[in-house]
Image (cartoon, rainbow, N blue to C red):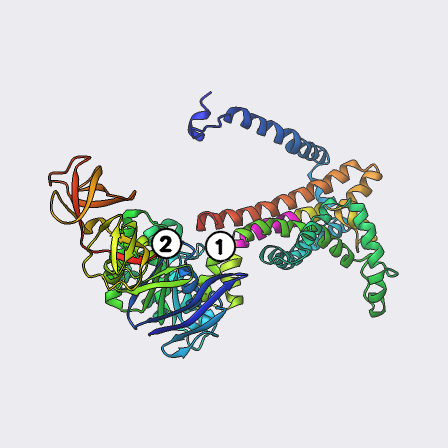
């Protein structure tokens, strides 16, 4: 089931949570909505689910307008951050809830429901847990049960709201891998919300980066990491330093020195600008051409070493990442920096 | 003293021995001593006489009236108290605080004041009584009047016990049920009510217990016609006024036994629920 979101807006009182969001999700795609808290990603997900009523715009499920449909009619599967399992029901009853509440005409027989529960319990690798209560399960197990419960109704779209947010780091990683495999096997169109970039980049086919109710960038994990489209994405995803520079006749200057940056589109403006550089894209030499700088800090972390340089004529420290076994310079040493990739935006 | 070891977990706020001693002493002095005295007085009658008194038709009809109307009033208050608690918790409307404060009035009002007010309203010449009278419906001086008075005093117990629990109900549970296709009534019945049921049961027990013991607000509106609208607490007072202390304590002991059995039963239901769902 493909999903088409058109010019979706949502305001709470006088504050806008979504400013005209357009997004297409292909059938069977695993898409991450990534952004800091307050970026509107959860609001967007809840609008798709029908738990939030949009202020404007349309949501199409497989070409059919679902904007005015109730939550119950949308046939979506929703997984909550805090599982939202029914504590007074057994695991089996939790999973079969969506089938048991159907009107008699469309309700499967008791035997069919039992089979479905067994099948789903096997799928989430918790066979034999049907008789237990949610309080007897660990967080990761509960979230898997929540997923099985959502899948039992054979939803057209699966929506996950920070599904691993309440779990500890180790379980998070395990469940993330598990979800990826699970998705590859079952092929549900899946939207999941996260504020964890590692999770989004690791798991998703496509990542949608949101900020302040707008989509900043959408693309594959490679796209958003390697080619951030906006200063926000540069800042939010991965590590980067921001340098205040200026552009003169289409050429970038750091202080008084011109810098050469490969694969930069032609600069069509003059004046102050911001340069975003990732530490792994900074190389340094003791002589030759480059952006001359002074070593101001050295910091070893695990297998790599971070070296801080202050470019001549600036206050900002540019970090470079080098293998720890490479002979490090000393503080105060001079070096020529080569910036291998960077983003440049008008200030 | 080795009492400490098995029960007490190390805590930054010690004081188990002191507090347990106080608790036992206090409960003994405030609760058990009077009840013990009551049983002692009643026992001076002898089993034979107590049974005779219990089976006396006037006692029986008073006990029946007391317990049945109390039960009915508490049961009646459950759905309506639930509805009021729901409105007060879920909606923010102008005057919400005012209505919230009104709930406590039946607690705060001297019961005699409530009784006089209710009688004035429901007596055949009162505002509501006059409307009902032409239809042949007598409210005051009948069991219906007793029921109304008990509904009045019992309402705050349901609302106040349900309210905080309802406020804590995770809205995501309702949303989860909705995404799974459950309609509104279904969601309330299968997701919200089970979470609230221990609180509802507690509120019901409190309202029931209060109603059984209620005296002030009932005697005015009841009219106290023997065999018709005479409640058990009034029968006790009547026996006391006739200097029949033994008879009064006997009726009291019977009431105590029934009340205790009822509350114990309700507690057992709750303990079972708790054992099953973990903490609800």
Residue at the disc numbered 2: A132
Quarter assignment of residue A5: bottom left
Which chain hosts label 2?
A
Picture coordinates of residue A305 (x, y %)? 18, 41
State the residue at coordinates (23%, 59%): A226
Give the vertical position of B20 relative to A138 (above or below).
above
Instruction: Examine the rendering and report whether any part of residue A127 can be seen.
Output: no
Rendered image quadrant of residue B23: top right
| Mark 1 chain | B
Q: Nearer the viewer, residue B55 or B149?
A: B149
- Percent across and percent down for residue A3 are 36, 73
Q: Do the residues marked 1 and 2 share a common chain?
A: no
Q: Is residue B168 visible?
A: yes
Residue at (40% x, 63% y) in the render: A214
Res. B130 image quadrant: bottom right
| Magenta region, residue range | B196-207
Residue occupied by mark 1: B170
Q: Secondary structure at mark 2?
A: loop
Q: Is residue A49 left or right of residue B228?
A: left
Q: Position of residue A267 (x, y in %)?
A: 27, 62
Q: Residues within 10 Å of mark 1 (few under 14, many from 20)?
A: few
In the rendered structure, does residue A165 fall within the stretch colored magenta? Answer: no
């Amino acid at each position: 089931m493909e999903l088409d979101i058109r010019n979706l807006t949502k305001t709470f009182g006088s504050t806008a949570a979504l400013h005209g969001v357009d997004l297409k999700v292909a059938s069977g795609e695993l898409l991450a909505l990534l952004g800091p808290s307050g970026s509107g990603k959860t609001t967007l997900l809840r609008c798709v689910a029908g738990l939030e009523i949009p202020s404007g715009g349309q949501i199409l499920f497989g070409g059919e307008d679902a904007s005015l449909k109730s939550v119950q009619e949308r046939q979506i599967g929703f997984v909550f951050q805090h599982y939202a399992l029914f504590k007074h029901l057994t695991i089996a009853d939790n999973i079969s809830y969506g089938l048991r509440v159907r009107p008699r005409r469309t309700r499967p027989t008791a035997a069919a429901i039992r089979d479905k529960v067994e099948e789903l319990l096997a799928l989430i690798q918790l066979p034999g847990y049907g008789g237990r209560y949610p309080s007897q399960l660990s967080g990761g197990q509960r979230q898997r049960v929540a997923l099985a419960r959502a899948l039992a109704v054979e939803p057209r779209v699966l929506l996950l709201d920070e599904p691993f947010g309440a779990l500890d780091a180790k379980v998070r990683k395990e469940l993330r891998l598990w979800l990826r495999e699970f998705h590859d096997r079952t092929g549900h169109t899946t939207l999941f919300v996260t504020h964890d970039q590692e999770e989004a980049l690791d798991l998703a086919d496509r990542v949608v980066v949101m900020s302040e109710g707008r989509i900043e960038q959408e693309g594959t994990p490679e796209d958003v990491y390697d080619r951030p489209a906006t200063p926000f994405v540069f800042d939010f995803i991965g590590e980067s330093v921001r340098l205040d520079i200026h552009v003169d006749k289409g050429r970038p200057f750091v202080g008084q020195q011109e810098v050469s940056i490969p694969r930069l589109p032609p600069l069509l403006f003059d004046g102050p600008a911001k340069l975003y550089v990732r530490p792994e894209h900074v190389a340094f030499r003791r002589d030759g051409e480059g952006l001359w700088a002074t070593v101001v800090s050295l910091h070893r972390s695990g297998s790599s070493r971070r070296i801080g340089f202050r470019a001549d004529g600036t206050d900002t420290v540019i970090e470079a990442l080098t293998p720890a076994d490479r002979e490090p310079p000393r503080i105060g040493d001079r070096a020529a920096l080569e910036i291998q990739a960077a983003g440049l935006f008008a200030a | 003293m080795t009492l400490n070891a098995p029960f007490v977990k190390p805590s930054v706020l010690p004081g188990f021995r002191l507090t347990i001693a106080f608790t036992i002493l206090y409960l003994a002095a405030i609760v058990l001593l009077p009840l013990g005295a009551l049983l002692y007085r009643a026992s001076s009658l002898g089993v034979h006489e107590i049974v005779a008194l219990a089976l006396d038709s006037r006692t029986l009809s008073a006990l029946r009236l007391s317990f049945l109307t109390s039960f009915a009033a508490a049961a009646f208050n459950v759905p309506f108290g639930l509805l009021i608690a729901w409105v007060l918790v879920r909606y923010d409307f102008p005057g919400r605080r005012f209505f919230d404060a009104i709930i406590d009035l039946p607690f705060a009002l001297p019961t005699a004041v409530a009784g006089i007010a209710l009688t004035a309203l429901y007596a055949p010449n009162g505002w509501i009584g006059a409307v009902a009278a032409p239809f042949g419906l007598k409210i005051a001086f009948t069991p219906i009047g007793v029921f109304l008075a008990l509904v009045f005093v019992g309402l705050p117990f349901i609302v106040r016990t349900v309210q905080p629990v309802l406020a804590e109900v995770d809205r995501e549970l309702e949303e989860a049920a909705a995404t799974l296709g459950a309609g509104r009534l279904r969601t309330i019945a299968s997701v919200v009510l089970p979470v609230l049921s221990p609180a509802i049961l507690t509120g019901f027990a409190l309202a029931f217990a209060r109603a059984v013991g209620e005296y002030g607000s009932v005697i005015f509106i009841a009219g106290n016609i023997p065999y018709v609208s005479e409640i058990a607490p009034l029968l006790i007072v009547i026996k006391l006024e006739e200097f029949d202390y033994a008879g009064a304590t006997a009726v009291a002991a019977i009431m105590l036994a029934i009340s205790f059995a009822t509350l114990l039963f309700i507690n057992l239901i709750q303990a079972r629920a708790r054992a099953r769902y973990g903490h609800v």
